[in-house]
Image (cartoon, helix red, strand yellow):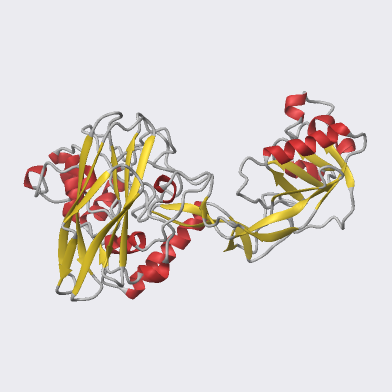
Amino acid sequence: MQVYVVYMGSLPESEYSPSSHHLSLLQEVVQDRLRYFSVFKISSSSTILVTFVFRMFLSAALLKISLSEVTKGVSTDFPRNSPGNSINSFTLNGTQFPLVYGKGVSSTCNDSEARLCDPDCLDSALVKGKILLCDATYGRSAAKRLGSLGMIMLNSEDDLSFLLSSPALGLTEDKYNAVKSYINSTTKPSANILKSEAIKNPIAPEVASFSSRGPNAIISDILKPDVSAPGVEILAAYPPVLSLTDDTEDKRRAKYTIMSGTSMACPHAAGVAAYVKASHPDWSPSAIKSAIMTTAWPMNVTKRSEGEFAFGSGHAYPVKAINPGLVYEAQKSDYIQLLCSLGYTEDQLRQISGDNSSCSNATNNKTLPRDLNYPSMSAKVAVQESFTIKFHRAVTNVGIANSQYKAEIFSDSSLKIKVVPEVLSFKSLNEKKSFDVTVVGGNLKAGTTFSASLVWSDGSHKVRSPIVVYAWNDITTSSAYD
């Protein structure tokens, strides 16, 4: 019997050594260009070291959509109402209840532990029948078991609502401190946690604060992420035999619940890919990926966005993705070129490809990773040095047989960007045309990022590719595994 191990979620920060059957699976992926290709590294020793550069067919950032679940507010004498984040289906019937701070309801712990509402610190006699204010969420289940009517907690992620088994509210630091000051200003503080309601987010869609950012920590010239998809506070199917929360005493059951995270963005992105595949069964994964990326909505930089390092090509747009006009395709030979540009030996290359591939037989052994025929264009440059960067790309016509596309650059930076040729003329479907994008600039300070975009248009289609040039000394953002 052959056993396959499927890794789901983040990989360890260090390189790991899977057993030999992983190599067989990885070889199969590379050898069939119609499958998704993961780039990885094999050491010269007998140990196989795997590092994923493209963790998924499509790497997606998490977007917060236009409607958000928040509590209407915590009603106190002062401040009167403090709206915050939570998914609270409970009501306290408009009644004000005593409000206590964690460090004041413990007789066994020091203040630093008690203010976090550590489960081992709470005194049931001091908690019962009251609303608890906590600097963290540690004691939420314990507080309920001890008779607390609800909790108000410090929530560092002001764009994420959470679901608990009792009335609860998460407040940002300024609002939380205001409630804490209120407790200290009166002898009998009281509060009421109101039921949640949906409100409109005027700046949506925006990338969630906890969504992994680029740049790519392994290959700096491949833009991370690819695209953005809804992943915050999504109405999702849920096993009706399980509790809606991690509280074993929570007896609520439902077929749907509100969830957030990669597990929500992933099905959106996968659904778009399936939708495109259903419309074009003969398209390769790279063509589908290109269609999704080049038709995505361009997104604006918000207060917590890092531009394309946050949202990639933009917000996935399924309706547009089935008719992209042009696609960037990457074949097996393109990935062989990529591995060659990364310095792989002939033995390593053949272990992956399963054939007699070699860098000496590659079309051009002097290519760079950024020359991969990818729908986005990214390059890391040296700090305070002049540079000239060339991106070579090829597109395939999947729109109208007899068509002409003109290039247009959108940029608010000081970089000089030129496209050659500026016009691509096609006479038939599936015809391919190549072009070069040259970016010239220099003297960028450390931490500087410039972004622009190239749009090919025939009047009906707009094929958009982000262009990102950045000068960073070190990549200190989230791992490429995130």
The number of numbered discs placed on residues in the rendered structure image is 0
Closer to us: 441 or 353 = 441
Q: Residue furthest top?
A: 110
Q: Measuring from the top left, give residue 436's x and y in whole percent.
A: 18, 52
User: Which residue appears at 37% of the width and 41% of the height?
Assistant: 215
Closer to us: 191 or 56 = 191
Closer to us: 416 or 314 = 416
Quadrant of the rendering where the N terminus is positioned: bottom left
User: Which residue appears at 40% of the width and 45% of the height?
Assistant: 309
Quadrant of the rendering where the C terminus is positioned: top left
Q: Is residue 276 above or below residue 22?
A: below
Q: Measuring from the top left, give residue 20's x and y in whole percent.
A: 29, 44
Q: Measuring from the top left, give residue 214's x and y in whole percent.
A: 40, 42
User: Which residue appears at 80% of the width and 45% of the height?
Assistant: 145
Closer to us: 117 or 397 = 397
Q: Is residue 125 above or below residue 407?
A: above
Q: Measuring from the top left, give residue 383's x and y in whole percent.
A: 30, 29
Q: Is residue 225 left or right of residue 167?
A: left
Q: Residue furthest right?
A: 187
Q: Is residue 104 left or right of residue 259?
A: right
Q: Residue furthest left?
A: 361
- Does the rendering let one see residue 217? yes
- Does the rendering let one see residue 138? no
Q: Is residue 268 left or right of residue 441?
A: right
Q: Is residue 186 left or right of residue 164?
A: right
Q: Is residue 306 above or below residue 466?
A: above
